Image: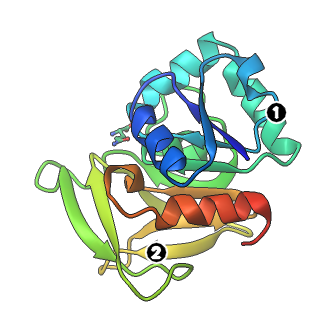
Amino acid sequence: MKIGVLASQGAFIEHIAKLRELGVEAVPVRLPEELEGLDGLIIPGGESTSIGRLMRDYRLTQAIRDKVKDGMPVFGTCAGMILMARKSSDANFESLGLMDITVRRNAFGRQRESFETELDVSVLDEKPFPGVFIRAPLIEKVNGTVEVLARLADGTIVAVRDGKMLALAFHPELTDDPRFHQYFLDMVSGRE
Ligand code: GLN
């Protein structure tokens, strides 16, 4: 199995390391031709405006949309989730518009700019997942076939799946818990 990690900007090295720990081939993607032959793609956290602009400049935006339309599974974390969303409350860049969710960027304000909290995740085992939130977005609305996988204690939606697409408001690649990466690999292989 070969998984690409969009490497325009942001926390792509950590995702590559996690995938390699799980024994799969992981490659950075900076150009459209590097999407060829991938079984799945991760879009990391970082700065969604920068990633969005770099994707556009390197002609990746449409290339990724086309691959996803052809069935390539995709996993976005934090800024990656913002880029996957069809709507964002503050989008001054072109998003991929892949998932029918509305997100709000930098949603937790100055007081809670970054925080860690345990999350109960419907598709993982009993053990709570360490949610690492860094200037995180939240999911305001989910539409259609989008399934909610986790919420904060106050009900805020922070993890969703739609078919072969997975999106999280937090950073599993910055923890030592591999379960969300494994879950994505199981989605790719059709086990989930
Ligand atoms: N605040 C960033 C944005 O709006 C996302 C932060 C992150 O990916 N950790 O793009």
Q: Quadrant of the C terminus?
A: bottom right
- Position of residue 185 measured from the top left corner of the image (x, y, whole percent): 65, 58
**Is residue 142 among the parts visible in the rendering?**
no
Residue in view at x 38 percent, y 45 percent: 105
Q: Are marks 2 and 1 in contact (CB under 8 Å)?
A: no
The 10 Å Cα crowd at callout 1, few under 14, some 14 to 19, many 20 or more, is few
Residue in view at x 70 percent, y 46 percent: 98
Ligand 1 sits in which quadrant? top left
Residue in view at x 53 percent, y 18 percent: 53
170, 2: nearer the viewer: 2
* Figure quadrant of residue 12: top left
Specify the label residue 150 is tagged with: 2
Q: Is residue 192 above or below residue 77?
A: below
> CB of residue at label 2: within 8 Å of ligand 1?
no
Residue in view at x 34 percent, y 75 percent: 152
Going from N to C along the chain, the mark reached first, 2 or 1, is 1
Compared across the picture, whether 164 is left or right of 87 comes to: right
Q: Indicate the amino acid at tag 2.
A: Ala
21, 164: nearer the viewer: 21
**Is residue 83 among the parts visible in the rendering?**
yes
Residue at mark 1? 37
Q: Indicate the amino acid at tag 1.
A: Gly
Label 2 – label 1 distance at C-alpha? 31 Å
Instruction: Give the residue at the far left of this rendering.
Output: 111
* Figure quadrant of residue 165: bottom right
> CB of residue at label 1: within 8 Å of ligand 1?
no
Q: Is residue 60 above or below residue 111?
A: above
The local secondary structure at tag 2 comes to strand
189, 67: nearer the viewer: 189
Q: Nearer the viewer, mark 2 or mark 1?
A: 1
